[in-house]
Image: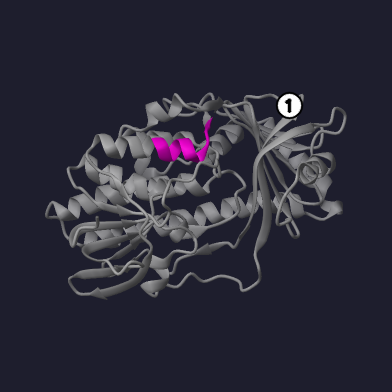
Amino acid sequence: MLPERTDVLVVGAGPTGLAVAATLAGHGVTATVVDRLATPPVTSRAAVVHAGTLEVLDRIGVAAPLAARGLPSRRFTVRERDRVLLSVPFDRLPSRYPYALLVSQAETEAVLADRLTALGGRVLRPYELTGLDLDGGGATATFAGGEKVRARWVVGADGMRSPVRELSGIDFGGPTDPGESFLLADIRVDSVLPRDQVNLFLAPQGPLVWAPLPDGTVRVVASMPDAPREPQARHFQDLLDERGPARRPDRVTDVRWSSRFRIHHRIAGTYRSGPVLLAGDAAHVHSPAGGQGMNLGLRDGVVLGDTLAAVLAGGPDALLDGYATARRPLAEEVLGFAAGLTRLTAVPPAVRPLRDLLLRGASALPPVRQRLAVRLAGFEPAAR
């Protein structure tokens, strides 16, 4: 049952919302966490947690149990069919977690939920937000069943179609076209590719990400002009045939789960509007290239949880303006980085030899490789 009043109402129990709530609980603040779904999703969706994010999650007691469930990836490789254009090792990262952790988003959410429960919190389901009235003292949230909750602060961690963002009138500017179309799946595949690294294949048709998961499946994500509504094994076989290894092609043997989605590159006009604060996909969405989206959202969540706890302990509300001011440029930088990785695929044929030469040159220079590794790993100035 929902309470009538709460200091913090967190809308959305995905990775970002759980990170906010677990961080607050670690400070002794019990947030009211709601989600519109009756049960947590069990599909993998985002599949990598980077070292910089693990360092931040370590502050709330989540990194170690999460690392125990994942598969360490020691290298990120950019390929064009059988040619390695760029190889970025993670073994020299300034971290206790010198790798990219390949792990299902469902596992990430489960570990965060376990931590929240251990600290005395829980998620209330299913509650769908339908109204949000803001005033000088906070906000009144209305839910589909008619329930109302009075909150001092409302955190929108409810995804890229965020009702919190829309109901509070925060702009989410971007193009009006349908956006980039992507196909994704967890597949079983016969492949000669190493099972300890993530591969980004560059192809004229678009990029393809190939990432192993702990259960022996491989996460495949690829852009397409118009992804099919009900993806089949043949769709993923066609993608691997046209973009993946050529000399010893991959062979799809099973599709465990598949989906499609569209992405615009967008950032909210502000992360704060009075008592409303945004984090994660509610605040920023971009290409999945480089696996940065969920990671940025998790780091948003911990920083916002720390900031709200400081305000509730007597700090000035202006601290939340500082959160909004500091996090938005980081999203802009991540958006630019992800878009840059995607653009590597789209260069004209005449320019590809130069692109390939530059990538191989970068791969041969240890300082450049290290800078790329740190950038991919998601280290932020405040989190180092």
Q: Report the number of numbered marks.
A: 1
Query: At numbered mark 1, what does the secondary structure look like: helix, strand or loop?
Result: loop
Q: Nearer the viewer, residue 13 or 64?
A: 13
- At 61% from the left and 28% from the top, the residue drawn is 75
Residue 184 higher or lower than 189, as above or below = below
Mark 1 lies on residue: 193
- At 28% from the left and 75% from the top, the residue drawn is 133
Which quadrant is the C terminus positioned in? Answer: top left
Residue 252 higher or lower than 224, as above or below = above
Asked if residue 37 lies left or right of residue 1, the reply is right
Q: How are the colours assigned in the image?
A: one colour
Residue 69 higher or lower than 381, as above or below = above
Q: Position of residue 90 (x, y in %)?
A: 55, 28
The question of residue 108 being in magenta is answered with yes
Q: Quadrant of residue 34?
A: bottom left
Q: Position of residue 203 (x, y in %)?
A: 79, 46
- At 50% from the left and 28% from the top, the residue drawn is 70
Asked if residue 220 lies left or right of residue 313, the reply is right
Q: Which residues are magenta?
A: 101-110
Residue type for callout 1: Leu
Q: Position of residue 13 (x, y in %)?
A: 38, 50
Dominant secondary structure of the residues highlighted in magenta in the image = helix
Residue 242 visible in the current orientation: yes
